Amino acid sequence: MYIGKLAKLTGCTPKAIRLYEELGLFAAPQRQGRYRIYAPYHVDLVRLIRIAQAAGFRLAELGALLATKQREQRFPLELAQVGIQAKRLQVQAQVAELHALDARLVELGQEATRLFSEQSPQQCSH
């Protein structure tokens, strides 16, 4: 299939597909003249890349995984699971930071209310 069909099937732009190829996220497809000819497995690969990006992975983080896939001629599920778990730990740490920030905002709101609710005219000048 040509790049336009691959783009349509994956919801990806041809420019992004060419970038994935340029970054080595998958091997260059066969060519027919000057046209790239993509195989059905490219659909799965591009979809996987897009799902990983939506889950917070950067393209650079996917390089090692997909290089291993090409080298071993199989998807390195174990390596993928390790990467996914590491990303989950990062997200959980970010969630904890956001919860702490939320608690500080609640505290700030309470303190502002305590200090400035029912202000006397003298307090307004502070």
Image (tube, rainbow, N blue to C red):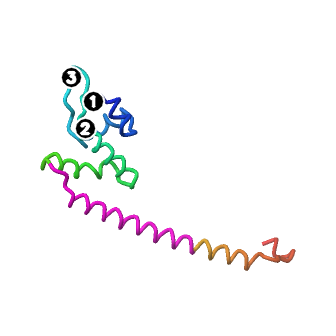
Picture coordinates of residue 55, whole percent (x, y): 39, 55
Q: Mark 3: which amino acid?
A: Gln
SS class of the residue under badge 1?
Answer: loop
Which residue is painted at 31% across and 30% down in the image? 3
The residue labelled by disc 3 is 32
Which residue is at the front of the view, 106 or 124? 106
Does 54 lie within the magenta span?
no
Which residue is at the front of the view, 115 or 56? 56
Say whether disc 3 or disc 2 marks the residue closer to the N-terminus.
3
The residue labelled by disc 1 is 1
CA gap, disc 1 to disc 2? 8 Å
Mark 1 vs 2: CB contact within 8 A: yes
Does 88 lie within the magenta span?
yes
Say whether disc 1 or disc 3 marks the residue closer to the N-terminus.
1
Mark 1 vs 3: CB contact within 8 A: no
The residue labelled by disc 2 is 40
CA gap, disc 1 to disc 3? 10 Å
Which corner quadrant holds the N terminus? top left
The region drawn magenta spans 74-103
Which label is found at residue 104?
none
Which residue is painted at 31% across and 48% down in the image? 48
Q: In the rendered image of this protein, does residue 3 appear above or below residue 46?
A: above
